[in-house]
Image (cartoon, helix red, strand yellow):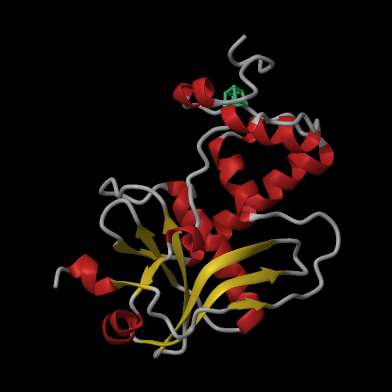
């Protein structure tokens, strides 16, 4: 059996259930999508969340998620997780929110035999020999939520690239990444709550994919 066959199993999970865990999340709340959009371009966030200009979905930049794990119906084999990663418990599709004002649905939370936990996220994408910054900070975001709710350390996460034969990639989540996430969240809040006008993305190629290119002074 190939490695990809080994790590996945369709419809073979006894733990396949949805959990919902909630805590107080008063005020403005930030989702993982907000973080992805802000990392795509802070000015995109300004147009969408501060000026409230609706985006046209068909022209929206390609949010990396694509299809969800539930649509794909292919999940990492629990035996693989147990033997290779030391997983002792697994929760699927967990909704978490925080009094710090962040919330999101984690595809999977893996509880490991060293007492830590790790988010696992499915990407309907090919693996390109490196993990992109936005994917790393999405995992960091989930790590923050998991740490707050379960009071366990989260120092790594996993991504499954479903278009690369379900390649499983592990990503370290360092203290520095948590600090950087705090900064991203603070900067994002300055844009959406105070209307701070951000600089455009420095990656011009993103503008051609952006639904705000007709009103953004970066490109008109
Ligand atoms: S057109 Fe470019 S700079 Fe302007 S919001 Fe879109 S991605 Fe950002």
User: In the image shown, does 199 or 138 lie closer to the viewer?
Assistant: 138
Place of residue 17 in the rendered image (x, y in percent of width and height, measured from the top left): 56, 79
* Quarter in which the N terminus is drawn: bottom left
**Residue at (54, 37) in percent of width and height:** 40
**Outermost residue toward the front?**
11
Image quadrant of residue 12? bottom left
**Outermost residue toward the top?**
220
User: In the image shown, does 199 or 46 lie closer to the viewer?
Assistant: 46
**Residue at (47, 61) in percent of width and height:** 69
Q: Is residue 99 above or below residue 192?
A: below
Q: Is residue 154 above or below residue 43?
A: below
Q: Is residue 87 above or below residue 73?
A: below
Place of residue 200 in the rendered image (x, y in percent of width and height, measured from the top left): 60, 26
- How many numbered callouts? 0
Q: Is residue 198 above or below residue 115?
A: above
Image quadrant of residue 59? top right
Whether residue 45 sits left or right of residue 76 in the image: it is: right
* Quarter in which the C terminus is drawn: top right
Image quadrant, ligand 1: top right
User: In the image shown, does 56 or 46 lie closer to the viewer?
Assistant: 56
**Residue at (45, 55) in percent of width and height:** 136
């Amino acid at each position: 059996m190939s490695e990809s066959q080994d790590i996945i199993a369709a419809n073979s999970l006894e733990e396949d259930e949805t959990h919902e865990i909630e805590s107080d999340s008063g005020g403005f709340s930030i989702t993982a999508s907000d973080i992805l959009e802000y990392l795509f371009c802070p000015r995109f966030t300004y147009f969408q969340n501060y000026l409230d200009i609706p985006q046209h979905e068909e022209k929206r930049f390609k949010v990396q998620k694509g299809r969800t794990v539930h649509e794909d119906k292919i999940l990492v084999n629990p035996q693989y997780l147990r033997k290779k990663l030391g997983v002792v418990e697994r929760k699927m599709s967990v909704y978490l929110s925080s009094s710090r004002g962040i919330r999101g649905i984690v595809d999977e939370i893996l509880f490991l035999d060293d007492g830590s936990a790790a988010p696992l996220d499915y990407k309907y994408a090919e693996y390109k020999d490196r993990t992109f910054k936005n994917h790393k900070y999405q995992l960091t975001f989930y790590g923050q939520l998991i740490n707050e709710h379960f009071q366990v350390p989260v120092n790594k996460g996993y991504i499954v690239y479903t278009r690369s034969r379900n390649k499983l990639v592990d990503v370290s989540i360092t203290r520095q990444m948590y600090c950087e996430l705090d900064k991203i969240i603070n900067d994002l809040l300055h844009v959406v709550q105070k209307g701070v006008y951000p600089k455009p993305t420095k990656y011009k190629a993103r503008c051609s994919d952006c639904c705000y290119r007709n009103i953004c002074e970066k490109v008109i």
